[in-house]
Image (cartoon, rainbow, N blue to C red):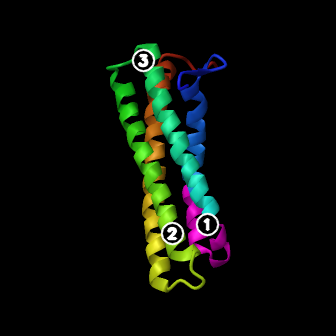
């Protein structure tokens, strides 16, 4: 399940979804939280954040399969990337929890108080910044593990 799809590594296919969806959903969740007219739609942000959890889990698991398929266990750059990927899943879960908390605090109430709104915004901002930062760190470490030596050992072609 986490190895290949149509002969291509699942990890290579799904990481791009994580790189796009996690930061995007952090912004969408914040937008729904701070815009009163949009708050009824916050349940959709919760569902989108749940999708981020699934995508990050598939990226993590497929990455482990890919690492074993290529025999890269113990490679410093790959191990660092794997550690980032393990934690990215946790940050995606944190973003989902923040979205649920925001939904409970502001979207399910007809007129939430300013304290509830401030708490929801703070929770979503912290989780969103953490998840986005970790997405960047994970993607950067993966890109460097794959491409840094390749680029270093080639010319510009011009």
How far apart marks 1 and 2 lie (CA) works out to 8 Å
Answer with left or right where residue 19 lies relative to residue 115.
right
Q: Residue at x 57, y 59 (%)?
A: 46
Q: Which residues are magenta?
A: 26-42
Q: Position of residue 79 (x, y in %)?
A: 35, 28
Dot 2 alpha-carbon crowd within 10 angstroms: few under 14, some 14 to 19, many 20 or more: many
Q: Looking at the picture, does residue 14 appear above or below residue 107?
A: above
Q: Residue at x 67, y 77 (%)?
A: 37
Instruction: Say which label, 1 or 2, has the lower sequence index.
Output: 1
How far apart marks 1 and 3 lie (CA) works out to 39 Å
Answer with left or right where residue 93 lies relative to residue 32.
left
Q: Residue at x 54, y 21 (%)?
A: 3
Q: Which mark is residue 114?
A: none
How far apart marks 2 and 3 lie (CA) works out to 39 Å
**Quadrant assignment, res 67:** top left
Q: Secondary structure at mark 3?
A: helix
Q: Nearer the viewer, residue 35 or 65?
A: 65
Instruction: Say which label, 2 or 3, has the lower sequence index.
Output: 3
Query: Magenta region's main secondary structure?
Result: helix
Find disc 2 in the rendering and name its residue.
Answer: 102
Q: Position of residue 18 (x, y in %)?
A: 55, 42
Find disc 1 in the rendering and name its residue.
Answer: 42
Find disc 3 in the rendering and name its residue.
Answer: 68
**Quadrant assignment, res 110:** bottom right
Q: Looking at the picture, does residue 140 appear above or below residue 134?
A: above
Q: Residue at x 50, y 19 (%)?
A: 150
- Residue 157 on the magenta span: no
Contact? badges 1 and 2 (CB < 8 Å) = yes
């Amino acid at each position: 399940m986490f190895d290949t799809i149509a002969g291509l590594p699942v990890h290579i296919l799904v990481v791009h979804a994580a790189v796009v969806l996690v930061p995007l959903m952090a912004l969408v969740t914040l937008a729904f939280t701070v815009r009163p007219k949009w708050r009824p739609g916050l349940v959709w942000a919760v569902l989108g954040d749940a999708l981020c959890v699934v995508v990050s889990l598939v990226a993590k698991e497929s990455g482990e399969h890919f690492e074993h398929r290529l025999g890269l266990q113990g490679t410093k750059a790959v191990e660092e990337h794997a550690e980032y990927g393990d934690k990215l899943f946790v940050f995606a879960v944190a973003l989902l929890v923040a979205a649920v908390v925001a939904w409970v605090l502001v979207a399910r109430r007809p007129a939430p108080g300013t304290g509830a709104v401030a708490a929801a915004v703070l929770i979503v901002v912290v989780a969103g910044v953490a998840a986005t930062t970790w997405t960047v760190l994970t993607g950067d470490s993966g890109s460097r593990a794959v491409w840094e030596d390749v680029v270093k050992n080639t010319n510009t072609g011009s």
